[in-house]
Image (cartoon, grey):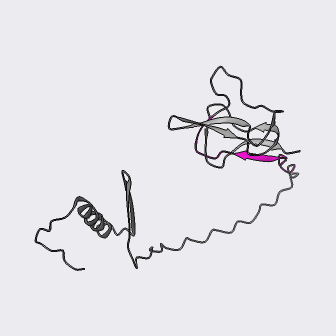
Amino acid sequence: MPEEPTEPIDESPDLRTIRQLVRLMQRYDLTAIDLGEGPGTIRLRRRGAAPLAGPAPAPAPVLMPAVSTAPSPAPLKVPAGLAIESPMVGTYFSASAPDAPPFVSVGTSVRADTTICVIEAMKVFTDIPAGLAGTITEVLVKNGQAVEFGQPLFRVDPA
């Protein structure tokens, strides 16, 4: 590794920041750094630094199914219809206010642009549209429940 000059160099604050980031990358063996600072963004990537492969995972043990004389349970019933999934992480609210009626309930007909709920994330309330037309057949979450990205919220019969 080449040594850094020991004599002071007149550097701009941006150049000093980049030099410090490069030192951090070398010190902690980082391959990339992204830094957003105000309107500007600094993105540094090291060339030739391939990610290290960890040890191969141990093979999973093969389990033999147990033989049972008990009657097999009924197959799980998969609900019919399409799911409307959460487009974001946050807290689900069925109405715009605690004393307001819910946007939709079982049996409500919706269009693609119908607001079906509100999801709050970081004090920002976002109206969630249905995204498809049909009839709500099932509400899969409770008011005030935390939801994840892609989590099913409603089941809709598109017929």
**Residue 67 point in image, percent of width and height:** 81, 60
Residue 159: which quarter of the image? top right
Going 19% across and 77% down the picture, which residue do you hit?
3
> What residue occupies the far top of the structure in this picture?
99
Which corner quadrant holds the N terminus?
bottom left
Judge left or right: residue 89 versus residue 18: right
Q: In the depicted view, which residue is nearer to us: 38 or 17?
A: 38
Judge left or right: residue 9 versus residue 148: left
- Please tell me whether residue 124 is drawn above or below residue 51 in the rendered image: above
Going 22% across and 80% down the picture, which residue do you hit?
2
The residue range painted magenta reads 74-92
**Residue 126 point in image, percent of width and height:** 60, 38
Residue 46: which quarter of the image? bottom left
**Residue 147 is a magenta residue:** no
Residue 116: which quarter of the image? top right
Q: In the depicted view, which residue is nearer to us: 58 or 68?
A: 58
So how many labels did they put on this image?
0
**Residue 128 point in image, percent of width and height:** 66, 39
Judge left or right: residue 97 versus residue 28: right
Prevalent SS, magenta region:
loop
Q: In the depicted view, which residue is nearer to us: 95 or 61?
A: 95
